[in-house]
């Protein structure tokens, strides 16, 4: 059977001084699978989009800003991550220049600037703690990871860099 994951983006917007990251605190919808957690911005790719266009659109929709510069930091395969066990394939971006003023909130929750050195103190998906250091490190090579989930829990984590 062919592998047909949901393709999505996940972006981390840096402040102009690169000391803070724009995160969403998913606190708006009681039925949200991510309720109470902090997350980067992003979402599902739409037909006719390339992955960079998807990231730009998601940042525009969720934060009200326009990406001027971004780098692909990695890819993540999340088998079984979805609410009903769907597989996800994510493209992880670092947005280091943007224009506009970020929204205070959106329908999914509150947008908050968080100091980079405080990210790991936030409530987040268990798996995010494994790949987030790779998003912000000084190694220019993208990472390519796989992080299977079962019943909402990370089962394992591995990655390579080319």
Image (cartoon, rainbow, N blue to C red):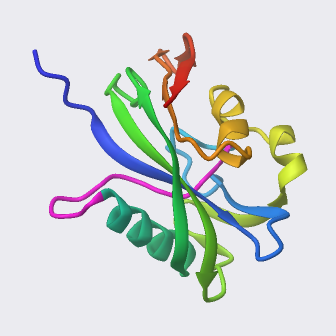
Magenta stretch contains residue 90: no
Query: Percent from the top left, x then y, of residue 126?
Result: 67, 26
Query: Percent from the top left, x then y, of residue 134?
Result: 67, 38
Query: Percent from the top left, x then y, of residue 59?
Result: 50, 69
Residue drawn where x is 54% and y is 66% of the image: 70
Judged by its main secondary structure, the magenta piece is: loop
Q: Quadrant of residue 56?
A: bottom left
Furthest toward the left, the residue is 1
Q: Which one is in front, 130 or 42?
A: 130
> How many marks can you see?
0
Query: Percent from the top left, x then y, of residue 80?
Result: 38, 20
Residue drawn where x is 54% and y is 22% of the image: 159
Magenta-highlighted residues:
37-50
Q: Which one is in front, 69 or 115?
A: 69
Magenta stretch contains residue 48: yes
Q: Quadrant of residue 5?
A: top left
In this picture, is 62 found above or below 142?
below
Q: Which quarter shows the N terminus?
A: top left
In this picture, is 71 found above or below 151?
below
Left or right of 68 on screen, residue 127: right
Q: Which one is in front, 70 or 7?
A: 70
């Amino acid at each position: 059977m062919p592998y047909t994951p949901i393709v999505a983006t996940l972006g981390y917007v840096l402040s102009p001084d690169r000391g803070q990251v724009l995160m969403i605190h998913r606190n708006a919808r009681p039925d949200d699978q991510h309720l109470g957690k902090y997350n980067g911005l992003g979402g599902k790719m739409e037909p006719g989009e390339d992955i960079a266009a998807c990231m730009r659109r998601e940042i525009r929709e969720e934060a009200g800003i326009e990406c001027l510069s971004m780098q692909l930091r990695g890819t993540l395969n999340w088998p079984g991550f979805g609410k009903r066990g769907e597989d996800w394939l994510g493209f992880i971006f670092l947005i280091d220049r943007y224009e506009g003023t970020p929204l205070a909130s959106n329908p999914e929750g509150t947008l908050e600037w968080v100091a980079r050195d405080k990210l790991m103190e936030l409530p987040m998906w268990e798996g995010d703690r494994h790949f987030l250091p790779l998003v912000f490190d000084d190694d220019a090579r993208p990472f390519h990871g796989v992080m299977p989930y079962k019943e909402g829990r990370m089962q394992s984590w591995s990655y390579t860099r080319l």
